[in-house]
Amino acid sequence: MAAQFAKKPMQAPYETSLSAGLAIDGRAIPYPFITDDQKEGMAAFVEKLQPIARDGSQGIS
């Protein structure tokens, strides 16, 4: 999911002006921080556990 959010701002410098690219970047930054995976990851970090992604896979060991 994070790759989806990162793709558009990364392509913006090649497709738009600087001001438009910065606007796209500014709108894209908050979205990865509201996902269930982010919440799980932060909770696991605080509790010193491995995060479990929605697909059931373990986090980085």
Image (tube, grey):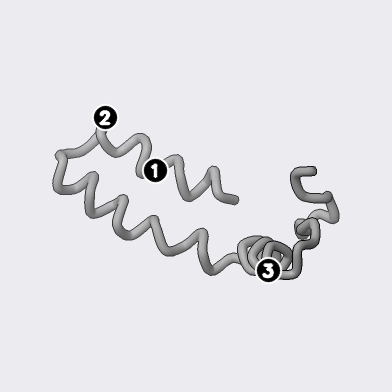
Q: Is residue 46 left or right of residue 15?
A: right
Per the model, the C-alpha gap separating discs 2 and 1 is 10 Å
Residue occupying image coordinates x 80% and y 54%: 55
Quickly name the residue at label 2. 14
Q: Earlier in the sequence, mark 1 or mark 3?
A: 1
Q: Quadrant of the C terminus?
A: top right
Residue 15, compared with residue 50, is above or below; it is above
Where residue 6 appears, as percent x and y from the top left, is 45, 44
Residue assigned mark 3: 46
Eye-nearest disc, 1 or 3:
3
Residue drawn 23% across the image and 44% down it = 21
Look at the picture and state if 33 lies above or below 8.
Answer: below
Q: Mark 3, residues whose alpha carbon is within 10 Å: few (<14), some, or many (≥20)?
A: few
Circles 2 and 1: CB distance less than 8 Å? no
| Residue at the farthest top position | 14
Residue 35, image x and y in percent? Answer: 59, 65
Residue type of the residue flagged with mark 2:
Tyr
Disc 1 target residue: 8
Which x, y percent locates residue 10? 37, 37
Q: Of 6 and 60, which appears nearest the observer? A: 60
Q: Amino acid at mark 3?
A: Val
Q: Nearer the viewer, residue 61 or 26?
A: 61
- Drawn side of residue 20 relative to residue 24, left or right: left
Q: Nearer the viewer, residue 48 or 28?
A: 48
